[in-house]
Image: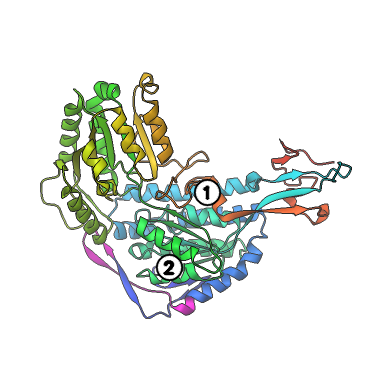
Amino acid sequence: MLTGKNYVGNKLSANGDVVFTTLNPKLNIKNSVHFTEASDDEINEAVKIADIAFDEFKGKSNLERAKFLNAIADEILALDSELIDVYMSETGLPEGRAIGERGRTIGQLRNFAALLEEGSWVDARIDTAIPDREPIPKADLRKMNVAIGPIVVFGASNFPLAYSTAGGDTASALAAGCPVIVKVHPMHAGTSELVGSAIVKAAEKTGMPNGVFSNLNSKGIELGRKLVSHPKIKGVGFTGSIKGGRALYNLAAARPEPIPVFAEMGSINPVVILPEYLANNASSIGKTYAGSITLGAGQFCTNPGLILCVNGDKLNEFLTVLSSEIEQAAPQCMLHPLIKTNFLNANVMMQQQKGVEVIASYGDSVDANYASQVVARVSGDEFLNNPNLHHEVFGPYSLVVVCDDAEQMEEILRGLEGQLTGTILGEVNEISRFSGVVSTLQNRVGRVIFNGVPTGVEVCPSMLHGGPYPASTDSRFTAVGTDSIKRWVRPLSFQNWPNEMLPKELKNENPLNIIRKVDNLDTKNSIS
């Protein structure tokens, strides 16, 4: 049952003066529960107990933390229909999407638990001593990754489960040994409270210290600013707009002790259609990409917002099919009135740009908070001359850029900002002829896709969900998959330490039986 309160560690608390409600965007009515924004005292208490908990939590074994993560997954499942119902009431998304996203959230938690159980994630490296080396003896050096401290995670607007309270940022930080304070997204406060209750129960059942997790309500941005500015916070995870992510990044960098902000931000995810592939597949591309553009009302960070193709015989067939499918697709509910308003404003701004022609849109009236999907067209010359056309339109929108030739296509790609994904639709024998286009695209994205759609992010070790700025604030890291744990650790070296005083991961006998790099060889063997 929802209380509208904050979790400050394992304690429910509501001392603040600001109260707000969530909204059912499908019905366009306020939900009944009133949520209380965390007060300054509650913020400071959450950070204080997280800092205290860190000393104990980072010392928990991998197996103990794995048990904690699996318990969180179990407790989320135990919420059953209550969680699904609240999720739907706060998002307007259908039951199937809610169940699917819950499954992804559970899968992420269990993946990190498995990573901990195996144990090699610490990247242990050992260079044994050579005391008789000339002219200078070589010291014994051993290095591994260790947790950095309390982390603030910002709930995402478009994924209330998989990118929010117990999502990838939280799961990876807890796996690393870092306590987490979640700054609740105000649109999903009920969903966040329920998931927060599951984490708190799991922490208590598995003997984790109080303060390992807190869940703080917030109506506006000030609470997030206070958390990021707090000297005891050591890292930030954020999924959202470029404006919001950059503001947090600047705030963290301006602290007396700067801290990392791992922000996944805007992306238009360019799709390049090569000429021969277009000639052979014009109709099927139109159908496939209409579905990708409108999927989930376009509210995905990997939505294909830009389609590049060279003018040719089959272009009109592709555009005709794409337009027909777009016009016939049923509009879908957006997550919140503000998102709908931003979508409309961005759409109008794009249509006002020189040379932009709307070639397809849903023409009938729609209910409040529903989006009318749009596809527009512009020439390569106009796109090159107008940076406004490079901006993301968050929602079911895509801009088709008709290029004169491959050279212009390459020039356009070279001028784009960093992106999460880039897609090549081409015949295998075309790739060598368009090597410049392919190479340029690779330089601008974190993931390059061949003959597919960008929507959909597989959770696995080889996934890279990030990219050059502004797709993310650090292109060396991913926000999805088990490698995302690397954001919340730092390397620590031990020089000439007695074996009995070393962490288990670095002891001679390798008691955890993990893979280690010993004198440049990957091995599970002990050191004699």
Residue type (three-letter) at the residue carrying disc 2: Gly
Residue 207 in the image: above or below residue 322: below
Q: Position of residue 496 (x, y in %)?
A: 81, 52
Image quadrant where one finds the N terminus: bottom left
Q: Position of residue 464 (x, y in %)?
A: 47, 42
Image quadrant where one finds the C terminus: top right
Residue type (three-letter) at the residue carrying disc 1: Ser
Residue 472 in the image: above or below residue 215: above
Point 40% across, 58% down: residue: 245
The span from disc 1 to disc 2 (Cα, nearest Å) is 22 Å
Q: How was this image coloured?
A: rainbow
Residue 174 in the image: above or below residue 18: above
Closer to the chain start, of discs 1 and 2, is 2
Label 2 element class: helix
Point 22% across, 65% down: residue: 29
Rendered image quadrant of residue 356 = top left
Number of the label disc, if any, that sits on residue 224: 2
505 lies left or right of 429: right
387 lies left or right of 500: left
Residues 321 and 106: in front is 321
- Residue pointed to by mark 1: 484
* Residue extent of the magenta highlight: 23-42
Rendered image quadrant of residue 203 = bottom right
Q: Position of residue 526 (x, y in %)?
A: 79, 41
Q: Is residue 210 visible?
A: no
Point 18% across, 31% down: residue: 321
